[in-house]
Image: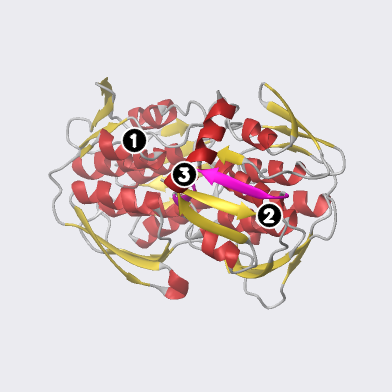
Amino acid sequence: MDAFVIHGGERLSGRVRAGGSKNASLPLMAAALLTDEPVVLEGVPRLADIANMRRLIDELGCGTTDEPGAHGSMRLSLRCHDESASTARYDIVRTMRASICVLGPLLARRGQARVSMPGGCAIGDRPVDLHLRGLRALGAQISLDSGDVVARAPRGGRLKGARIFLGGPFGPTVLGTANVMSAAALAEGETIIESAACEPEVADLATILNAMGARIRGAGSPRIVIEGVRELRGARHTVIPDRIEAGTYLIAGAITRGRITVENCPIDHLMAAADLLEGIGVRLDVAEGAGDGLRASVTVECSGRVKPAQITTQPHPGFPTDLQAQVMALLCMADGNSVITERIYPQRFLHVPELARMGAALFHQGPTVVVSGVRELVGAPVMASDLRASASLVLAGLAARGKTAVLRVYHLDRGYERMEERLAAMGARIERVDEKELAGVAAGAAAGGE
């Protein structure tokens, strides 16, 4: 396994470009299962999760080819050549939770699906009951067998439109909305999803489905209306920029007290995060003539200690849970006490003890962490536990005094492409090494975590 070694204290300066959205790309790839015509996706990032989804849909009879796209991205072509398979195996599904998004397309197009319960990051329980509730409302017969979700279309083979409420105890479900919307696109009659997820990734999926011939309106709002059609065709689509990657780099500029420009930044999808950063003293400048608010050039600058803040993660357009860990790293050096409350995944705090190893003053109780700002963080060996926690530890290492070793960065590779190279290009002293070279450091980190 690989690790990052970071020598902190360097102010970042330069430019970095946000890539295509990972969280949008995965459901878009699954949408190719809804047709036997070619689907072409532009701007797909080269990430571990993308590679795993390619393996999965290839086993489901959907071949993929890629070629270089603009700005180092990937142009991905997908086409189903064999629709006899309908089983998503555990060996692949366990690597990422987004693999569950093949359930709806398989059920709607092939009349049946068997999908292993998904894996992903260790950030708490993420049940799929809302997915199953929505598909049952469309007439699917659902059962569980040996850890697999088994779904079958009703007699006659076609799902039926319905009114579906997808609200849950922690808000709407993004992948559940994607599953139900994809399935309803081929259902008979009208489907209305109430309390639908409003995330930009849901709207992006609706855009490609409509290009494929679906009739969907209201995506991006809490009420989505779908008029089912008999079949869908192929389409070409450009993936939206990754708002979480862009937000992470904005915070990287702030935590190092640097000045960087994030290009291809979907600032309109980051309003809550931008409001928070400006409120604590970080300057954000959106370049005039930089295009619309979905592909802007945003310069971030921070020259001193930031102010404390109170943050509660919420469904979009509220503050995103996927930036909670990164902003916590920034607030570790704020001038005062901050309060961070996690309302989406209340157990998403595995980065707290690792930040404490670096000298952060944190008090964790239930879904809330009180962050008492310190004068500085100190480099230490730390263990990455999930994708966004990994990013927070890298950010902390960039700002810390001395050397930080971030172990198990394979988590990071799921959502950030060549992060160490892009940070190094802006002046960070960071390198990727084999963990075997850090045996002593790894032993120290393991002992500290016991």
N-term-proximal mark, 1 vs 2:
2
Q: In the rendered image, which residue does mark 1 sit on?
A: 94
**Residue 266 visible in the displayed image:** yes
Please state, as top left, top right, bottom left or bottom right, where the N terminus lies in the image. Answer: top left
Residue 53 or 398: which is nearer the viewer? Answer: 398
Q: Quadrant of residue 352?
A: top right
Task: Residue 165: say if magenta.
Answer: no
Query: Which numbered disc flags the more N-terminal residue, 3 or 1?
Result: 1
Q: Label 3 belongs to which residue?
A: 411
Q: Residues within 10 Å of mark 3 (few under 14, many from 20)?
A: many
- Amino acid at circle 1: Arg
At x 68% / y 54%, what residue is drawn? 8
Q: Quadrant of residue 84?
A: top left
Gap between marks 1 and 2 measured at Cα: 35 Å
Is 302 on the left-hand or right-hand side of 91? right
Left or right of 309 on screen, residue 24: left
Q: Which mark is residue 8?
A: 2
User: What's the CA distance linking mark 3 and mark 2?
Assistant: 21 Å
- Cα distance in 3D space between marks 3 and 1: 14 Å
Q: Could you say whether the residue bearing mark 1 is in a helix, strand or loop?
A: loop
- In the image, residue 422 sits, relative to residue 186, either above or below, namely below
Q: Residue furthest bottom?
A: 289
